[in-house]
Amino acid sequence: MENQVEQLTALLVQQAEMARQAQEESRRREVRLNDVLEQLISRQVGNPGREDSQAGAVEATPQHVKFSPSAALTPHLSSSASLREFDAWRHKFRGYVALTKVTSLPLVQQKAILTSMLDDEWTRMLRYVVDVADGAQLEEVLDAMEAHLRGQRNVIVDRGSFTQECNNKVKPSMIFYVP
């Protein structure tokens, strides 16, 4: 029994380390991506193509645009997310859409951005399981994803969670009244 507990502990430690490494790698990728974007933007800003002498002087001075690595981090959704986690992710996704003005892009690109924020399992579910029309807007896709996630949950588990939540709430009139 102790041997199994030790093995389980070792596996949990190993899993935590792997998760930490994955987060670190993700952060490094994000920083590299921002560096590439900075270089691209600074090249575009540095080559406007003006011909007068003042424009030549402006072109000679390098204009550097700096992106913060945490300016617009993308919220990722895993397939093991609960309804509560999905709701929180959806709220973050709406903020990301507002921050990056994704709605101004064509629908195909909007859906590509959404898909890039999902793990492989969610991507497969969205392609093959969730019934969404090709011309559906982002909100319709998110509604269909939520309905699918809701359908995957057991009604009895939902009722049990609701009952437990209701029983754990203490109403002001129920606070220990001592006559």
Image (tube, helix red, strand yellow):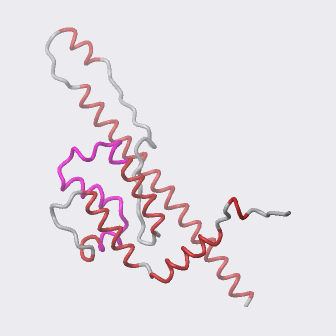
Vertical arrangement, residue 100 with respect to residue 60, above or below? below
Residue that protrudes farthest toward the right in the picture: 179
- Residue at horizontal 15%, vertical 10%? 52
Marker count (numbered): 0
Residue 57 screen position, x and y as percent: 26, 12
In the image, 11: left or right of 142? right
Residue that protrudes farthest toward the bottom in the picture: 1
Q: Quadrant of the N terminus?
A: bottom right
Q: Is residue 13 magenta?
A: no
Indicate the quadrant where residue 127 lies.
bottom left
- Residue at horizontal 26%, vertical 31%? 43
Vertical arrangement, residue 100 with respect to residue 109, above or below? above
- In the image shown, does 170 or 128 lie closer to the viewer? 170
User: Where does the magenta region start and end?
Assistant: 96-125
Dominant secondary structure of the residues highlighted in magenta in the image: helix
In the image, 5: left or right of 140? right
Indicate the quadrant where residue 40 lies.
top left
Q: Quadrant of the C terminus?
A: bottom right
- In the image shown, does 62 or 129 lie closer to the viewer? 129
- Residue at horizontal 58%, vertical 66%? 17
Q: Is residue 101 magenta?
A: yes
Residue that protrudes farthest toward the top in the picture: 53
Residue 37 screen position, x and y as percent: 32, 40
Vertical arrangement, residue 152 with respect to residue 53, above or below? below
- Residue at horizontal 75%, vertical 62%? 175
Residue 93 screen position, x and y as percent: 37, 53
Residue 90 screen position, x and y as percent: 39, 57
